[in-house]
Amino acid sequence: MEADTFTLYHLIRKPKKPVEKAPLVIMLHGYGSNEEDLFSFAEDLPDELFIISVRAPYPMAPYGNAWYAIHWQGSADGKFSDDNQAVISREKIIQFMDEVMEEYPVDPDNVTLIGFSQGSILSFAVALSYPERIKNVIGLSGYINENILKEGYQNKDFSNLSVYSSHGTADQVIPVAWARKTKPFLDSLGIENTFSEFPVGHGVAPQNFRELKQWLEEHL
């Protein structure tokens, strides 16, 4: 498969030591950013990982990309986000994963999604809609939007899914109150999960990165 035939543009970091089927990490950036953002973490993550950082499909002016439109001033239907676009992106990620499995030597049973902000929201949506496809989610500075989950998700088998989520207590973009609903929501589905808060804004503090890295190492 040629690089330009993939559903989504992406960067890769191959494993630093040879493995036949590498654990896969897919990184989903936030609103208005690009594939280079979370990819800055790649060199500090475990050597055995095959890491892919993906560019969201909707270009923004003058730069950056989004997984879906956000209505900062509210919309006619009162919604904060374009949920239809979000569902389209959710399905694009699944299609992209199929392409990745075909093209790269990765383990389809060991897939971790790392998302920041809007990418975190999409990570939750993909994993809760298709838990058979995802082993781990690391959701940073995001929340669960139930409106973009696949219908009937409650009846899925979540026994192999684990989640780490974190948020800044001073986040002025996505209120920490929204993020605090994540753990009880996941608990209600019987999903093994951890939630942490850090005294920062809309970003990833060094101690946050150290904690998520340790969590990932323990869940590979």
Image (tube, grey):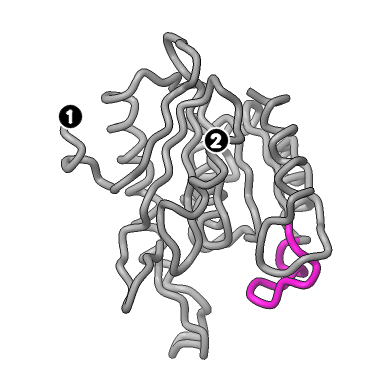
Name the quarter where the N terminus is drawn: top left
Residue depicted at x 63% and y 26%: 160
In the displayed structure, 212 sits above or below 111; it is below
Question: Would you say residue 27 is visible in this rendering?
Answer: yes
The amino acid sitting under disc 2 is Glu
Secondary structure type for disc 2: helix
Q: Quadrant of residue 117?
A: bottom right
Q: Is residue 69 magenta?
A: no
Q: Where 48 falls versus 44 (above or below)? A: above
Q: Secondary structure under badge 1?
A: loop
Q: Which residue is mark 1?
A: 1
Mark closer to the chain start, 2 or 1: 1
Q: Position of residue 191 (x, y in %)?
A: 71, 37
Residue at left 81%, top 58%?
198
Q: Residues within 10 Å of mark 2 (few under 14, many from 20)?
A: few
80 left or right of 34 in image: right
Classed neighbour count for the residue bearing mark 1: other residues with Cα under 10 Å, few (<14), some (14–19), many (≥20): few
Query: Where does residue 62 sit, x and y in percent of width and height?
Result: 32, 78
Q: Is residue 176 magenta?
A: yes
- Left or right? Give the position of 63 relative to 112: left
Residue that appears at 66% across and 67% down: 202
Q: Nearer the viewer, mark 2 or mark 1?
A: 2
Residue 135 falls in image quadrant: top right
Which quadrant is the C terminus positioned in?
A: top right
Residue located at (32% from left, 40% from top): 96
Magenta range is 167-179
Q: Is residue 135 left or right of residue 70?
A: right
Any part of residue 152 in sight: no
Residue under circle 2? Answer: 43
